Amino acid sequence: MEVLGVFIFAGGAFGALFFHQYADGYKPYLIIRNFLIAVAISGLIVFAIGLYRYSKMPIYEYKVSAHYIDGSTKTLLFDSKYDPKINAARGTYWIEYGAYTELGVVRFEIISKKKR
């Protein structure tokens, strides 16, 4: 949501600047410029709402049992706002958790998930 707000703001601000340069009292350009200023302000509002919602998300303490492609198992302990997920591309598997990635994980089980 934050990224969407930034793009809306950038588009509205650029358009408003463009129409402001060529306005020179021409009423339709002034109307378009004012509309684009309103769009840019709404983009800032969307950005602020996204930041607020992200800051209010709870942080969880995870204990995950990761099963690797070679058959081994490892327990991972980490804190995150999001659940871990497994990605695959071109025969390579990895788990994304917190701000980290671990190669070779084909399956995982969440042992515990506690709110911090």
Image (cartoon, rainbow, N blue to C red):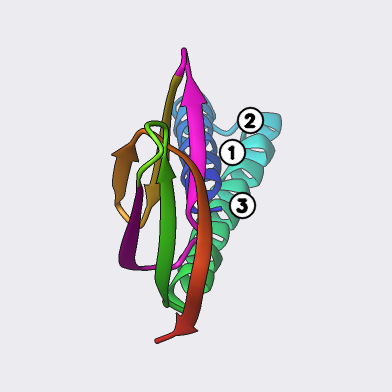
Instruction: Identify the disc placed on residue 29.
Output: 2
Residue picked out by circle 1:
33
**Given this view, does label 2 or label 3 mark the residue nearer the observer?**
3
Compared with residue 39, is residue 63 higher up or lower down, i.e. above or below? below
Query: Does label 2 or label 3 sit earlier along the sequence?
Result: 2
Mark 2 residue element: helix
Q: How far apart are marks 2 and 1 (CA)?
A: 6 Å
**Given this view, does label 3 or label 1 mark the residue nearer the observer?**
3
**Residue 88 location, x and y as percent?**
50, 26
Q: Residue 78 magenta-drawn?
A: yes
Compared with residue 32, is residue 48 higher up or lower down, i.e. above or below? below
Amino acid under disc 2:
Tyr
Mark 1 residue element: helix
Residue visible at 43% across and 63% down in the picture = 64
Residue picked out by circle 3:
38
Q: How far apart are marks 3 and 1 (CA)?
A: 9 Å
Query: Does label 3 or label 1 sit earlier along the sequence?
Result: 1
